């Protein structure tokens, strides 16, 4: 591991939370425990998002649950998590051991459950709560993601906001949403403090031609990694045109050029998940270094000067 | 100990193409993190719930590294090979996985027959480094990866001795092979070798000053006992650990060790004193698939 890259010009603020750099460990990658999230913090992430938790412990889908292909990853982890109480304890431990801002991530099987889970993780006082209304690989069990319905998404937003007073919340949207800009606007109107976009694309499927079966035990899973960067950039661009709250642009980032596209489209911070596999352990540092070089080369003094300028 | 002579000596009997490949380093090291279909060539039955599956190796793998073995329609689990040969362009290698039936997945594996298709992905993690005068300490199924390590030491001309233990003589793996080299056997019930734990003579073995390195694999209490004795005798050690694993490529976080958070699938599964110093969960019940750590029995 190389030395971390420090550049005050990369500092950003997401819903009142100050990040030393715009990279955010995306939910679902590491972030199972205080120590695994801490591992990402040591790699240089500006903030870390824990894995999504629900009310009760879930073991998730059996393996194979994560398989790479030429342009990304297909995963159907299936929301494995130790339950909100145990996750809150991990988040609290992280807060006591590390200075890097920490985002919780929550899901619910019903609208009401989002509120209950939010209240539990709020006790650990995370800097932000991300609301996962868009997991694509538990559909057979939990039904169509709530995040495809603007009415339900707004309802969940209001409920989480009430259940976790004083903690900013970000709604994590699915690229499958029809009119993602309008959906983001509905979240903002319901009180969301930020938008995370996008969750994985799909679901997709990989079939082994020799074994002649889908490789994932769940058969289908969300697509992440390089393949989805253009989808993420388009979604962030559409959302930025509709909302004034900050966007955590996520999807396919493993290099500074990728992060720049999301920032130019309107993102304040940039999620990195699969990029840890595609870009290696130095991905957070490499992205930050590349951003500094871009600021130098083009005479900018901070990231706000380039945020969303692709719209002009 | 110089290893040049035994290595070069081995070239003599090999086909010309393989000698050339070895000279220019053309063996296929690149692995695959996506399952590669492999056909089971042979199933060696140690007893009805302990079998070794022999397959064509789709990649080269070092002792102590691991693969994810996929039984289509069932699940996939990590295994460290009990033997493997280099995968050459002109001649594919072989990989052997020794499996004991303990859960649903391994019981399903017991029904696998030669000719059946399985999926393999890997190689993952960091294995053992090959050192002269190594003392190998294996407990139960931990003997399996040590067999590959011993084979690698043997073919590099590096001397070693093995201390191998299991519950009963029936579960003691590869005893014939090890006994033709250098090994002491232990069983809990005394049905083979000396009755008692494999670690009971470790201190005495190390006090001879002959061994410069200890490589161990087995149940965690055994590993912790080995660690303690090695610390006391100031002998470097490499310990092969086991945790619930999901992705194998260092991103899912399931196998991160509490404390430093290192990923057993990437920074491990073989750990040395330096890495172990940062870990706080040694000896605790392992986190399960949900990430929860079960309470200690009786707590």
Image: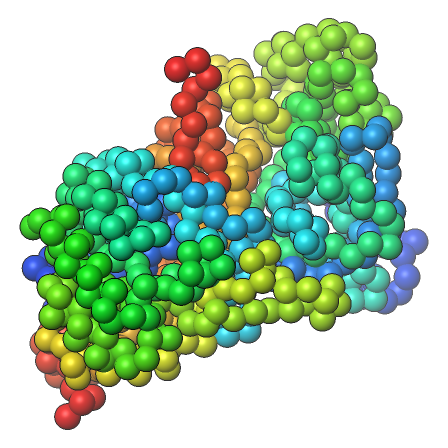
Q: Is residue A157 above or below residue B66?
A: below
Would residue A39 be visible to someone looking at this image?
Answer: no
* Figure quadrant of residue B260: top left
Q: Give the residue at x 25% y 39%.
A: A88
Residue B123 left/right relative to A164: right
Point out the image quarter for the C terminus of chain B: top left
Q: Which residue is painted at 7% across and 50% down in the image?
A: A166
For the view shown, which residue lies furthest in the bottom direction?
A: A312
Query: Residue A81 lies in what quarter of the image?
Result: top left
Residue A136, placed above or below residue B113:
below
Tag count in the figure? 0
Where residue A57 appears, x then y in whole percent? 39, 40
> Along the line of sight, which residue is nearer the eye, B60 or B298?
B298
Q: Nearer the viewer, residue B90 or B99?
A: B99
Image position, residue A163 (x, y; %)? 14, 48
Q: Position of residue A41 (x, y in %)?
A: 27, 50
Q: Residue at x 37, y 28 (%)?
A: B280
Above or below — where is B11 with respect to B299? below
Give x and y (percent) for residue B132.
66, 33
In the rendered image of this protein, does residue A167 appear above or below residue B256? below
Q: Nearer the viewer, residue B258 or B76?
A: B76
Q: Which coloring applies here?
A: rainbow
The residue lying toward the viewer, choosing from A273 and B292, is: B292
The quarter in which the N terminus of chain B is drawn is top right
Q: Residue visible at 87% across and 50% down?
A: B114
Residue B42 in sight: yes
């Amino acid at each position: 591991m190389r030395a971390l890259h420090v550049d005050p010009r990369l500092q950003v603020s997401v819903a009142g939370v100050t990040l030393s750099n715009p990279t955010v460990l995306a939910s679902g990658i590491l972030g199972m425990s205080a120590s695994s999230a801490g591992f990402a913090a040591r790699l240089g992430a500006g903030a870390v998002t824990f894995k999504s938790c629900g009310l009760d412990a879930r073991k998730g889908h059996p393996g194979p649950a994560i398989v790479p292909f030429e342009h990304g990853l297909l995963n159907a982890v299936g929301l494995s998590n130790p339950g909100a109480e145990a996750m809150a304890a991990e988040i609290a431990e992280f807060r006591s051991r590390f200075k890097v801002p920490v985002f919780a991530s929550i899901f619910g099987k019903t609208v009401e459950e989002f509120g209950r889970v939010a209240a539990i993780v709020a006790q650990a006082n995370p800097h932000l709560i991300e609301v996962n209304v868009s997991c694509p690989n538990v559909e057979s069990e939990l039904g169509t993601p709530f995040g495809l319905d603007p009415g339900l998404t707004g309802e969940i937003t209001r409920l989480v906001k009430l259940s976790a007073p004083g903690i900013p919340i970000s709604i994590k949207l699915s690229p499958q949403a029809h009119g993602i800009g309008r959906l983001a606007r509905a979240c903002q109107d319901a009180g969301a403090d930020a938008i995370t976009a996008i969750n994985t694309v799909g679901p997709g499927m990989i079939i082994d031609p020799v074994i002649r079966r889908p490789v994932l035990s769940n058969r289908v899973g969300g697509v992440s990694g390089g393949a989805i960067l253009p989808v993420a950039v388009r979604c962030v661009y559409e959302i930025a045109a509709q909302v004034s709250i900050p966007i955590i642009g996520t999807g396919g980032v493993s290099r500074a050029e990728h992060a720049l596209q999301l920032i130019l489209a309107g993102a304040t911070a940039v999620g990195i998940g699969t990029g840890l596999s595609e870009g290696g352990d130095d991905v957070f540092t490499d992205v930050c270094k590349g951003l500094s070089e871009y600021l130098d080369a083009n005479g900018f003094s901070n990231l706000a000067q380039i945020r969303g300028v692709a719209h002009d | 100990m110089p290893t040049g002579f035994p290595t070069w000596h081995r070239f003599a009997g090999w086909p010309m193409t393989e000698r050339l490949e070895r000279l220019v380093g053309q063996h296929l090291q690149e692995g695959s993190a996506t399952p590669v279909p492999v056909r089971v060539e042979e199933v060696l039955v140690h007893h009805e719930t302990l079998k070794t599956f022999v397959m064509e190796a789709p990649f080269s793998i070092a002792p102590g590294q691991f693969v994810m073995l996929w039984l289509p329609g069932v699940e996939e689990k990590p295994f460290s090979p009990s033997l493997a040969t280099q995968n050459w362009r002109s001649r594919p290698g072989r990989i052997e996985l020794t499996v004991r039936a303990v859960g649903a997945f391994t019981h399903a594996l017991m029904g696998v027959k030669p000719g059946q298709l399985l999926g393999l992905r890997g190689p993952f993690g960091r294995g053992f480094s090959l050192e002269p005068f190594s003392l190998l300490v294996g407990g139960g199924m931990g003997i399996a990866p040590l067999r590959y390590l011993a084979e690698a030491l043997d073919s590099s001309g590096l001397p070693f001795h093995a201390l191998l233990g299991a519950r009963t003589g029936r579960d003691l793996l590869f005893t014939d092979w090890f006994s033709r080299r250098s090994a002491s056997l232990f069983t809990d019930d005394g049905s083979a070798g000396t009755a008692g734990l494999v670690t009971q003579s470790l201190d005495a073995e190390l006090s001879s000053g002959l061994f410069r390195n200890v490589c161990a694999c087995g149940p965690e209490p055994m590993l912790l006992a080995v660690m303690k004795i090695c610390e006391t005798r100031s002998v470097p050690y490499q310990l092969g650990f086991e945790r619930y694993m999901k992705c194998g490529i260092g991103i899912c976080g399931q196998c991160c060790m509490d404390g430093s958070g290192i990923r057993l699938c990437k920074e491990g599964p073989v750990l040395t004193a330096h890495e172990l110093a940062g870990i706080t969960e040694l000896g605790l019940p392992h986190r399960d698939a949900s990430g929860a750590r079960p309470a200690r029995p009786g707590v």
